[in-house]
Structure formats: C-alpha cells, structure tokens
C-alpha cells in the first residue's frame, strides 16, 4: 500500500506530495536508530552481562527459579545474556514490531527459543497469569530504558508499572540503581546557547549597541535538555564553580514513583564566579554493592580511567533560569525538579528561615515567554552571539550599502536588518517567512526601531509592489539561515526566494551573499563510524540479523543520502584536501537545468576512508566569505576544526556499512548532481 505524505521542501520552499511505501517510516526509524551504537558499546555490554550473571546467581542461591522480565529488549541481547547465565525463563518485551520480529530471529539463531519468549507489546499491556503473556511474575527485572537525561524515554512510569503488576516484591533489578551527578559551572560559550548578548556596531554616527528585549533577558528558556558530547568541550571553555555533587538516586529493585517531585542539595562554591550552567551525567550500578558500575562521567571527573565512546548516552547541559553571581564558600541550594520525562534546575542562596524556604520550590516546568527559544535552537543562539561572524557581515554590509540603499532581508530570525539600518541603508524591509514576527517586533521595540524597519509577512512569491511602497530593491541580503534547514544546502532556499522576488529587484541590484559553494573532504572518524558499522557478534551472541536489518533500511534510501552531524562533537582527520565541487550564483536566478560535477580527489594521508564531509561556504562579497563547515585544518596529522554552530553533512561510504576491509585507496571518485527543480543533491562516491 502506498500513502501520500505532504512535506515542505526545505530548499525550494514548495509544498510537495510524495508517494511513500508503507515501510517508509519503519525504514527511517531503523536506519537512523542507535542500535548499532549500543551494540558497539563494549563497556555497557560487559557490565550488563556481569550484573545479570550476579543477579541470576543471587536468586539461585535462595533456591528459587530465575524468571527474568526484560523490558525494551531490542535485539534480545540482555535476555540471551540471562538465559546463558542460567535463568530458567525470560520474557522479552519489545513494542516496535519490526524489532520484535528481529529479536525472535536472533533468539532462535542463538539457540534460546525454549528459554526466551518475545512479547510484541508495550509493557503496560502485558498480562500475567495462566492465560496471560507471562505465566507468573518475574523475580529479576532487566531493562535498558535510559537516555542521556536518564528519564527522558519514560523509564520511571515503566518501572512504576512493572513493580505494581509484573515483578515480585523484593525482586532483583539490573541495573540496581542509577545516580545523577551535577556540577555548577560558568561558561560564556554554553551560556551563549541560551542568551542573546548585546551586539556592538561602529556606525557613521557613533557606536551603536543592539540590546535584546527584557522579555528575552528574563525568559527561563525551554526545559528540554541540551545533550552533547561533553568530552569534546575544551577545559578552557568553562570554569567549574563547585565540586561534583550527587543530586539524586533511583533504586530500581524497589517500587518507583514517577510523580513530579524535587531534590535539593547544599553546595559551597570552590571559587567565585557567575553560576550559569549545571552540567549533569549519571552512572548505573549493576549490582547492590556498586562493584559493577557504568558511568557517563566526563574526562575531567575520572581523568585516569579510559573513556568509552558512546552516542546513545552523552552528558547534559542545563541552563539556570538566570545568571547568579556566587562567592567562594557561601551556602547555596541547588534544586532539581522533575516530572515523568524531564529535569530542570534552580539555584538559591541559603537563608535562615529554612522551612519557609522549602515552600519556594517551583515544580512547574519552565516555559519560554519570549518565543525566541521556540524559534532559535541552541546552536543558532551561539551563531548569533559569534562576534567574529557578525564582524564579517558588518564588513560586507559596509562595502555594499549606500545612503540611498533600499534593502530587503530574507533570512529567519536574523540581525541583518538591524545591522543594515545602523550601517546607513535608507530603507530596510524584512521578509518574515516561517514564523510570526511577534518576538522580532519586541526586538525592534527594545532598540527603538519599530518605525525604522518594516516587517513584511508574506511568502516571496506573494510579495507585491505595495509591500515595498512601489520601490525597487537595490540591496538583497540574507545570511542565509532558515529554521527548516537540516542539511547545509537547504539554506539555498535563499536562491529560490531571490528568484521569486526578482521582479522587485532593481536592474543594478547587489545580492549579499553574491554566491555560495559546496565543499567536500574525505575523512577518517575517530568514533562516529561506529553508528553505521555492523556488529557481527556482541559478547559472543550472533546479532547479524540486526546488522542486515539496518543495512536493508539504509539501502532503502538513506545510504544514498548524507546525514547532518555537528562535527565539533565528533573528531575526525582529513585524508584529502578540502575541495570546492559546486558553485551557486545568487546574482542570477535559479537555472532550469541541473548543476552537476564529477571528478576525483587524491588521498594525502594514510587512514580509513569512512566518508565524505560536505558543507557550504557563502561568499558575501568578492573577498569576504563565511564557512558553515571547515574553519581550520591544523598540523600534519590533518586534525580539523569545524564551525561549532552548524551541522555538517556526512556521507558514509558503503565500506563502513558493509564493514569491508579495503586496501589503501589512493583516490576517491565522486559524482554530485544538484536538481534545481527539487532542490535535492544526489551524490555517489567510489574508493
């Protein structure tokens, strides 16, 4: 059966109806899943196996049969560990049907069909009794329901239900407990992901300061966690203000409460500074004694132990509602509030009236009131706060603006209209596309610009001369940035918008940026390749069925496509020089014909060619460019520094997905085609 799916094309801006097979969603889910990453997580798998063996032994020592309940079994790995450790029977629950089918095959292939029953249901729908899904309640509860925030995938309500209806009182649990740790830090870099900093502009008539509106300044932001690879954050980008503190623990062997609550700890800053950020991670003890421990602690906490790379569990960055100046040694209270799925933090100074103080705790989740946090994601805040980048735009605008310039800006949530006004444009109009202009009118109001910049809410193709007061546009500007973009070239929507408004442009119009180019480089990843690499066997169990399933889903469509990744979090080394492969001329309208290129790129360094990284560069003027990808290639080793505010496109070579061992290739051939009708880029690489 085919279904029609509506989607807005991020590059062309048009609404499209695509005919998709019924398997499309499922293939996407599998292809982009984290299953491979989990199976490659040696530390996790070894610790789970040790914990399961110990739990089965403890039950057997009591003279009981070991009956295991495995919620969210995935491949069936943890159930197979339990069966091989001597469990009498395992109930493996998996709600995602394709995954449950795969688990049945994997269990059969490994010879455990008589010991493991796969149940394709949500755990809350599982029945117990002679005619039920489970014959009796289990006495060992094994789960892996955790995300980076620990509780974001619904672990608490799932455990709560399991203890009430599916497991015996006093059951063994693997993991036995989880503990959440926190550390208070000051970090201009991380704070710049939540707050908009003032922008300083040297204008003709003196220095101007662009300030964010008070609504934005006082806004608590969004409660959603910012999860990152904290191990890639250089130590000079933050300053620790407190020791690492245990925030709260959950004992999974006892009944669990999922209702909203809060936890409070007392802190004494180890140095004075501005408390802005709470860094957080967790560890799990697989056994009651805490001897078998799996931790997400970042590099500075356990500097002597080898770090296990993983992408399915990272570390959390939480933003305090406001910046709090703190003094070394003063008494502070840090409060963690949580609901069923998320956590947020508050910091307060200690007061004498402790009891009254307790009542101050607000367990309600923070809500964005300024709307900016709904429009801009965290990297976008970082990008707008990047002074070097802003300087490039100011320098370029200075070159193109004249005192009689009539300027139109096309970009989402951009500061360019304000910069254009400050730098002397006679008239500035701002075409607002994908969002309502409310928070921007607040922004203009805070800087007394309401009557200086005209907001036009219209799609480019619906722009009328009356919108522009019958004037022709002499300068068209864009960053370009659009909230709908996922891949670097999706921001080429600027070119399509420029084409749609071409009848409103003066014949001598200046377009900024004047052009863009697509660049690529062949790289070897330190770890990111693992998310696409087959596993084969995991702790002695054959999981090739899962590998094949992922490969089939990737081949369904995804393996022929690039995927977005923020490469500042995923180190790689370049094996080739960066190469410009396509150019897009914004001074002309989008052509009817496709833009194609083919060629080969020489490999200069030895290494595993895992894939190609692609990014865009925007040429604001003939001599000023901004890159969304490579910022610097340092040293002979080919270490790369990437733009930290953008995701780059990664195209994994089939050798990673097929796990082929290739003899050292000397070059990579490529064919890249930009279809101007669909705005899509098709690519093919051969080693």
Image: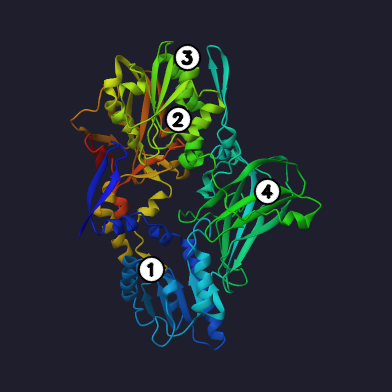
Distance Cα–Cα, label 3 vs label 4 = 44 Å
**Is residue 293 in sight in this rendering?**
no
Q: Is residue 466 above or below residue 294?
A: above
Residue farthest toward the left in the current orientation of the protein: 593
Q: Is residue 663 above or below residue 178?
A: above
> For residue 478, which numbered disc appears in the image?
none
- Which is more N-terminal, label 1 or label 4? 1
- Which is more N-terminal, label 4 or label 3? 4
Classify mark 4: helix, strand or loop.
strand
Q: Say which quadrant the C terminus sits in.
A: top left
Determine whether, in the image, residue 312 is placed left or right of residue 100.
right
**Which of the two discs, 3 and 4, sits closer to the camera?**
3
Q: Dots 1 and 3: beta carbons under 8 Å? A: no
Distance Cα–Cα, label 2 vs label 1 = 43 Å
Q: Say which quadrant the N terminus sits in.
A: bottom left
User: What's the colour scheme?
Assistant: rainbow
Residue farthest toward the right in the current orientation of the protein: 352
Where does label 2 land, which residue?
414
- Badge 1: few (under 14), some or many (20 or more) residues near its Cα, within 10 Å? some
- Which is more N-terminal, label 1 or label 2? 1
Determine whether, in the image, residue 194 is placed left or right of residue 673.
right
Where does label 3 land, which residue?
424
> For residue 347, which numbered disc appears in the image?
4
Distance Cα–Cα, label 4 vs label 2 = 32 Å
Distance Cα–Cα, label 3 vs label 2 = 18 Å
Q: Is residue 592 above or below residue 40?
A: above
- Which is more N-terminal, label 2 or label 3? 2
- Badge 2: few (under 14), some or many (20 or more) residues near its Cα, within 10 Å? some
**Is residue 321 in sight in this rendering?**
yes
Q: Position of residue 264 (x, y in %)?
A: 68, 57
Where does label 1 land, which residue?
95
């Amino acid at each position: 059966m085919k279904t029609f799916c509506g989607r807005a094309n991020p590059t062309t801006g048009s609404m499209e109806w695509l005919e998709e097979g019924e398997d499309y969603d499922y293939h996407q889910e599998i292809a982009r899943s984290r299953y491979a990453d989990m199976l490659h997580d040696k530390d996790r798998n070894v610790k789970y196996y040790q914990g399961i063996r110990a739990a089965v032994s403890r039950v057997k020592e009591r003279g009981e049969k070991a009956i295991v309940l495995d919620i969210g079994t995935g491949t069936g790995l943890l159930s197979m560990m339990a069966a091989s450790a001597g469990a009498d029977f395992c109930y493996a629950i998996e709600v995602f049907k394709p995954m449950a089918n795969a688990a049945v095959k994997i269990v059969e292939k490994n010879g455990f069909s008589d010991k493991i029953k796969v149940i394709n249901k949500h755990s809350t729908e599982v029945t117990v009794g002679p005619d039920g899904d489970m014959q009796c309640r289990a006495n060992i509860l094994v789960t892996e329901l955790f995300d980076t925030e620990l509780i974001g995938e619904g672990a608490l309500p799932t455990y709560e239900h399991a203890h009430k209806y599916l497991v015996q009182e006093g059951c063994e649990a693997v993991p036995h407990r989880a503990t959440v740790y926190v550390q208070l830090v000051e970090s201009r870099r991380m704070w710049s992901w939540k707050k908009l900093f003032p922008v300083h502009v040297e204008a003709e008539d003196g220095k101007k300061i662009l300030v964010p509106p008070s609504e934005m300044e006082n806004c608590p932001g969004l409660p959603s966690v910012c999860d990152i690879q904290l191990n890639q954050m250089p130590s000079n980008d933050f300053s620790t203000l407190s020791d690492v503190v245990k925030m709260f623990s959950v004992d999974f062997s006892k009944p669990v409460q999922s209702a909203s609550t809060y936890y409070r700890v007392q802190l004494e800053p180890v140095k004075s500074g501005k408390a802005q950020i709470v860094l957080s991670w967790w560890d799990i003890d697989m056994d009651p004694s805490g001897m078998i421990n799996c931790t997400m602690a970042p590099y500075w906490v356990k500097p002597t132990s080898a770090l296990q790379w993983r992408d399915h569990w990272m570390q959390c960055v939480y933003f305090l509602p406001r910046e709090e100046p703190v003094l070394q040694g003063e008494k502070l209270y840090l409060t963690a509030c949580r609901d069923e799925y998320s956590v947020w933090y508050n910091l307060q100074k200690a007061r004498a009236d402790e009891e009254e103080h307790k009542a101050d705790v607000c367990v309600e989740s923070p809500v964005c009131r300024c709307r900016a946090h709904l429009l801009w994601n965290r990297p976008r805040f970082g990008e707008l706060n990047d002074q070097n980048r802003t300087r490039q735009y100011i320098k370029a605008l200075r070159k193109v603006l004249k005192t009689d310039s009539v300027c139109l800006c096309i970009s989402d949530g951009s500061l360019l209209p304000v910069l254009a006004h400050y730098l002397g444009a006679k008239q500035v109009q701002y075409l607002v596309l994908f969002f309502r202009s409310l928070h921007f009118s607040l922004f203009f109001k805070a800087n007394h610009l309401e009557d200086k910049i005209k907001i036009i809410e219209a799609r480019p193709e619906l722009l009328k001369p009356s919108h522009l007061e019958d004037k022709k546009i002499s300068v068209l500007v864009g960053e370009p940035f659009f909230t709908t973009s996922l891949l670097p070239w999706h921001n080429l929507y600027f070119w399509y918008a420029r084409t749609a408004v071409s009848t409103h442009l003066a014949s001598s119009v200046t377009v900024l940026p004047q052009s863009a180019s697509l660049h690529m480089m062949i790289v070897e990843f330190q770890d990111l390749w693992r998310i696409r690499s087959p596993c084969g066997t995991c702790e002695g169990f054959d999981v090739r069925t899962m590998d094949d399933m992922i490969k089939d889903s990737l081949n369904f469509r995804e393996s022929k496509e690039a995927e977005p990744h923020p490469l500042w979090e995923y180190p790689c080394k370049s094996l080739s020089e960066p190469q410009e492969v396509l150019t897009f001329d914004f001074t002309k309208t989008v052509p009817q014909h496709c833009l194609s290129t083919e060629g080969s790129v020489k490999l200069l360094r030895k290494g595993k060619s895992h894939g190609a990284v692609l990014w865009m560069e925007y040429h604001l003027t003939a001599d000023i460019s901004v890159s969304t990808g490579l910022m610097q290639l340092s040293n002979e080793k080919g270490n790369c520094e990437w733009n930290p505010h953008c995701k780059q496109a990664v195209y994994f070579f089939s050798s990673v997905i097929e796990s082929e061992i290739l003899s050292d290739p000397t070059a990579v051939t490529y064919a890249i085609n930009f279809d101007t009708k669909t705005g899509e880029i098709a690519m093919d690489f051969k080693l």
